[in-house]
Image (cartoon, rainbow, N blue to C red):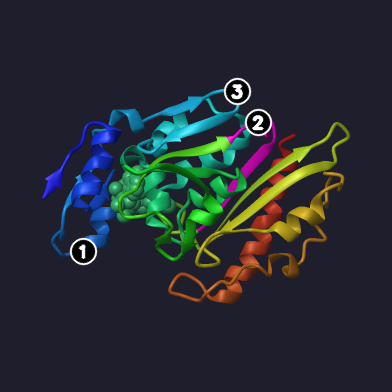
Amino acid sequence: MYFRPRTLNETIETLSRHGGQILSGGTDFFPALGDRPVLGPVVDISGVSELRGIDINDKEIRIGGLTTWTEVLRAPLPRCFDALKAAAREVGSIQIQNRGTVAGNLCNASPAADGVPPLLALDAEVELASQSAVRRLPLSQFLVGNRKTLRRADEVLSAVIVTRGLDHARSAFLKLGSRRYLVISIVMVAAIVDLDGEGRVKQTRVAVGSCSAVAQRLVELERHLVGRMAERGFTDRISPEHLSALAPIGDVRATADYRRDAALTLVKRALEACVGAR
Ligand SMILES: Cc1cc2nc3c(=O)[nH]c(=O)nc-3n(C[C@H](O)[C@H](O)[C@H](O)COP(=O)(O)OP(=O)(O)OC[C@H]3O[C@@H](n4cnc5c(N)ncnc54)[C@H](O)[C@@H]3O)c2cc1C
């Protein structure tokens, strides 16, 4: 069975009645099938226009559940979203960015999903809608493992929400892959740094992807940096211990040791990029 609802209400009603897999841009959905046919009902939400686009109000920024990477790139977003925009530019190719959605990237829950570290650094929440309720969860809780989330089968991810507060903070995203283009990351890092009037770190958030089943915020490191002058060399004292929350694996793309070393270098570079851009 194939359903193509036109509204969010129709979507959640269809999911509640028939269940089935949600299809959005299809850029993860179809490759995951390989040679197999689709089994069970499919709920294609690509025509639900109310889920598309980005709304900005005084309190929060709401990225609709059908918003593509290209739409993220074109939106006039505050400076702290620069890392998310940089990640958007790295997702596959322009064709993939035109089809692929932020929500699809999160629901697919790959450890190498480019959207996750910048959204973790933004303290993003996801909004999940079903017939019985609409609930919000921090992204850090929503993602629970490799390809595992807390989304229930009858829920659609209707929006990604970022509470405003760090609009003017600098942010950066760095992705290391084995080539420059169309590449799955070996390591990626997103950082946000907010400075006070004297140039000291007021708040910082750092998230690393591809180095654990779920991308991780480096909370210890974030605490360690608060109060430091953001000047040349302020990352010198960052040590491998600050990255101990990571649990990289070795695979065809890189060894665990290489990932650990690369993560340390990228964390420093991302933080320096935030400060250097002052
Ligand atoms: C050639 C190629 C290169 C790629 N390169 C990258 C890359 O560099 N970095 C990267 O991170 N990804 C990459 N991807 C993966 C993919 O493009 C992204 O993850 C994209 O954001 C997925 O969005 P989608 O709308 O296409 O999701 P879909 O394929 O439609 O769906 C993905 C999963 O999420 C579920 N889903 C989708 N939307 C919702 C929703 N609103 N609510 C609930 N569940 C939902 C679906 O049921 C499915 O399980 C690449 C893919 C291809 C084919």
The amino acid type of the residue labelled 1 equals Gly
The residues bearing labels 1 and 3 have C-alpha atoms spaced at a distance of 44 Å
Residue nearest the viewer, comparing 237 with 217: 217
Numbered range of the magenta stretch: 163-176
Mark 3, secondary structure of its residue = loop
| Observer able to see residue 83 | yes
The amino acid type of the residue labelled 3 equals Asp
Tell me where residue 16 appears, x and y as whole percent. Answer: 25, 48
Tell whether position 105 is magenta.
no
Q: Nearer the viewer, mark 2 or mark 1?
A: 2
The residues bearing labels 2 and 1 have C-alpha atoms spaced at a distance of 42 Å
Position of residue 262 relative to residue 100, above or below, is: below
Residue 58 disc label: 3
Q: Quadrant of residue 208?
A: bottom right
Q: Quadrant of residue 159?
A: top left
Tell me where residue 76 appears, x and y as whole percent. Answer: 52, 25
Residue named by callout 2 = 167
The amino acid type of the residue labelled 2 equals Asp
Q: Nearer the viewer, mark 1 or mark 3?
A: 3
Tell whether position 169 is magenta.
yes
Classify the position of the C terminus by image quarter. Answer: top right
Neighbourhood count class around disc 3 (C-alpha, 10 Å): few under 14, some 14–19, many 20 upward: few
Residue named by callout 1 = 34
Left or right placement of residue 101 versus residue 9 in this view: right
Of callouts 1 and 3, the N-terminal one? 1
Neighbourhood count class around disc 2 (C-alpha, 10 Å): few under 14, some 14–19, many 20 upward: some
Residue lying at the far front in this picture: please name it: 132
